[in-house]
Image: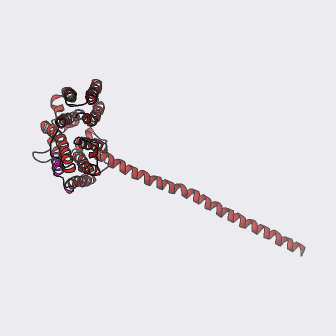
């Protein structure tokens, strides 16, 4: 009996040990499964987030959203020109300024994306990193985005009910379309004079539309343009025209291959480069004289004279160091010109 009882106790102990081992194995397996699954969940989240950021980055590069900064700065700066006192900074003014920002931002993006659609083969040679040229977007996706943004630009110009904005957005749309689209008598970018004229007209139209919108339909004042505003029109029109010519300098190889007779193709990089820099320096000289004559306060005279002399000096120093055989260096200078263009929107506030 004692031996039988001992055997039963040993058997019971062994059973409890087996049960503990099974529980331990099951618990351990569960922990392993959880630890194996958890990184997968994290990886899925990281992958999803990365995919969203990638899509946002592709959209940003296709729409070239960095160029929107100049448009917004321009609208804000020109909107401030009609103001005569701090009392004009009312909620109605800021709403009116926002109404000017939206259509021109949309149309600025539209013109850029349309140009990529019509220049796909050229960009594959000149700018293979562009979204369409690299295949990150299909032509169908590019067309859909371009059409949607163009409609939003025209739509906001119509909905806001300001005649200057309406006419300004229509002209902006038509000139931007004529610049790129491949139709008879259009595709102005292949005709150097029309290309430069179209870009200069863009600047003239933009400044005039925004100023008239704020002056007449936001502040409710007669359309009287101060002398300083004529300076703004002339300066930016000349600067924009130079930008339109200069941008073709690093694209000579691709333009030659596709028979696009830009000024750089016809006359050579060096000559066009020299003329562009010379015109900009003359433009800055014009700004120095205008600021010294038209600015009523001594501080304003000093800011405009010193400011424009400083920008002209920076331009000259950068231009002297550029190797025209290095397309990336010329492209870098082109982007610097856009920074100078944007900086002018600050200085024009002192010419009053």
Magenta segment boundaries in residue numbering? 158-177
Considering every residue shown, the one lying at the far right of the view is: 2
Q: Residue at x 13, y 48 (%)?
A: 183
**Count of numbered circles on the image:** 0
Which of the two residues, 199 or 92, is positioned nearer the viewer here? 92
**Magenta span includes 175:** yes
Q: Whole-percent x and y of residue 130?
A: 30, 43
In the rendered structure, the answer to whether residue 173 lies left or right of residue 33 reads: left
Q: Is residue 131 among the parts visible in the rendering? A: no
Q: Whole-percent x and y of residue 308?
A: 26, 28
Which quarter of the figure is the C terminus placed in? top left
Q: Is residue 168 among the parts visible in the rendering? A: yes
In the rendered structure, the answer to whether residue 283 lies left or right of residue 326 reads: left
Residue 187 figure quarter: top left
**Magenta span includes 17:** no
Which of the two residues, 309 or 103, is positioned nearer the viewer here? 309
Which of the two residues, 344 or 278, is positioned nearer the viewer here? 344
Q: Whole-percent x and y of residue 291?
A: 22, 29
Looking at the picture, the colour scheme in use is secondary structure
Which of the two residues, 279 or 347, is positioned nearer the viewer here? 347
In the rendered structure, the answer to whether residue 131 lies left or right of residue 224 reads: right
The image shows residue 278, relative to residue 139, as above or below, that is: above
Considering every residue shown, the one lying at the far bottom of the view is: 1
In the rendered structure, the answer to whether residue 28 lies left or right of residue 138 reads: right
- By secondary structure, the bulk of the magenta-drawn segment is best described as helix
Which quarter of the figure is the N terminus placed in? bottom right
The image shows residue 126, relative to residue 173, as above or below, that is: above
Q: Whole-percent x and y of residue 313?
A: 28, 25
């Amino acid at each position: 009996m004692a031996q039988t009882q001992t055997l039963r106790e040993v058997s019971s102990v062994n059973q409890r040990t087996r049960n503990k081992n099974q529980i331990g194995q099951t618990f351990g397996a569960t922990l392993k499964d959880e630890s194996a699954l958890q990184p997968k969940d994290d990886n899925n989240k990281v992958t999803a987030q990365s995919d969203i950021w990638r899509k946002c980055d592709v959209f940003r590069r296709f729409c070239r959203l960095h160029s929107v900064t100049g448009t917004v700065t321009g609208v804000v700066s020109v909107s401030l020109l009609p103001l005569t006192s701090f009392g004009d900074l009312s909620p109605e003014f800021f709403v009116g300024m926002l109404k000017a920002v939206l259509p021109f931002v949309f149309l600025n993006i539209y013109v850029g994306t349309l140009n990529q659609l019509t220049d796909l083969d050229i960009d594959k040679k000149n700018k293979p990193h562009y979204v369409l040229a690299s295949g990150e977007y299909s032509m169908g996706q590019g067309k859909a985005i371009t059409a949607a943004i163009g409609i939003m630009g025209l739509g906001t110009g119509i909905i806001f009910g300001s005649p200057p904005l309406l006419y300004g957005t229509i002209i902006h749309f038509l000139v931007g379309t004529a610049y790129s689209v491949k139709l008879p008598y259009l595709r102005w970018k292949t005709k150097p004079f029309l290309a430069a004229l179209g870009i200069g007209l863009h600047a003239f139209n933009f400044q005039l539309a925004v100023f008239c919108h704020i002056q007449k339909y936001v502040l409710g004042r007669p359309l009287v343009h101060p002398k300083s505003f004529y300076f703004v029109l002339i300066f930016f029109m000349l600067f924009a025209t130079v930008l339109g010519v200069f941008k073709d300098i690093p694209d000579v190889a691709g333009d030659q291959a596709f028979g696009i007779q830009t000024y750089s193709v016809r006359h050579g990089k060096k000559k066009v480069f020299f003329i562009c820099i010379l015109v900009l320096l003359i433009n800055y000289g014009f700004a120095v004289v205008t600021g010294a004559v038209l600015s009523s306060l001594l501080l304003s005279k000093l800011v405009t004279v010193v400011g424009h002399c400083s920008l002209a000096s920076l331009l000259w120093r950068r231009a002297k160091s550029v190797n025209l055989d290095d397309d990336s260096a010329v492209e870098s200078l082109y982007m610097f010109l856009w920074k100078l263009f944007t900086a002018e929107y600050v200085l024009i506030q002192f010419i009053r």
